[in-house]
């Protein structure tokens, strides 16, 4: 997914909005922006600028990431690309 995002949105920029920790877990809230300049999930480039929010929950052991869960506003992204009804 990340590699495909770089191809589809070559000017992608990530911003960490907030991080919280609880024992061996870290929650990161982020926003990314980019211009749809390449194919993405079967959608031809639209030239549209998008803003997408998401969360990552990492589980750490001995200071290393052992598991990650990535949640992103995919419906919002698809709506901005014109691939989903408003």
Image: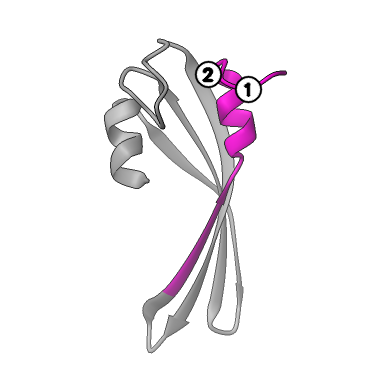
Q: Left of 71 or right of it: where is 37?
A: left
Q: Secondary structure at mark 2?
A: loop
Q: Which residues are magenta?
A: 67-86
Q: Where residue 52 appears, x then y in whole percent?
A: 56, 34
Residue shown at 48%/16% (left/top)?
49
For residue 78: magenta?
A: yes
Q: Residues within 10 Å of mark 1 (few under 14, many from 20)?
A: few
Q: Which numbered marker is on residue 81? A: 2
* Residue 75 badge: none
| 21 on left or right of 2 | right
Q: How is the image coloured?
A: one colour
Q: Position of residue 40 (x, y in %)?
A: 38, 28
Residue 36 sits inside the magenta stretch: no
Q: Give the spatial CA distance, label 2 vs label 1.
A: 8 Å
Q: Is residue 48 above or below residue 71?
A: above
* Residue 84 left/right relative to 58: right
Judged from this view, the residue extending furthest toward the bottom is 62
Quickly name the residue at label 1.
84
Which residue shows up at 51% across the image and 22% down it?
Answer: 50
Number of marks: 2
Q: Nearer the viewer, residue 19 or 1?
A: 1
| Secondary structure at numbered mark 1 | loop
The answer to the question of whether label 2 and label 1 lie on touching residues, with beta carbons closer than 8 A, is yes
Which residue reaches farthest front? Answer: 42
Q: Nearer the viewer, residue 52 or 19?
A: 52
29 w.r.t. 46: above or below? below
Identify which residue is drawn at 53% across, 83% down.
24
């Amino acid at each position: 997914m990340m590699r495909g995002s770089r191809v589809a949105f070559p000017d992608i920029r990530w911003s960490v909005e907030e991080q919280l920790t609880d024992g061996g877990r870290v929650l990161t809230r982020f926003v990314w922006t980019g211009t749809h300049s390449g194919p993405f999930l079967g959608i031809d480039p639209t030239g549209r600028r998008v803003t997408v929010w998401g969360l990552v929950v990492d589980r750490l052991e001995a200071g290393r990431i052992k598991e990650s869960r990535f949640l992103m506003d995919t419906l919002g992204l698809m709506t901005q690309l014109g691939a989903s009804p408003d």
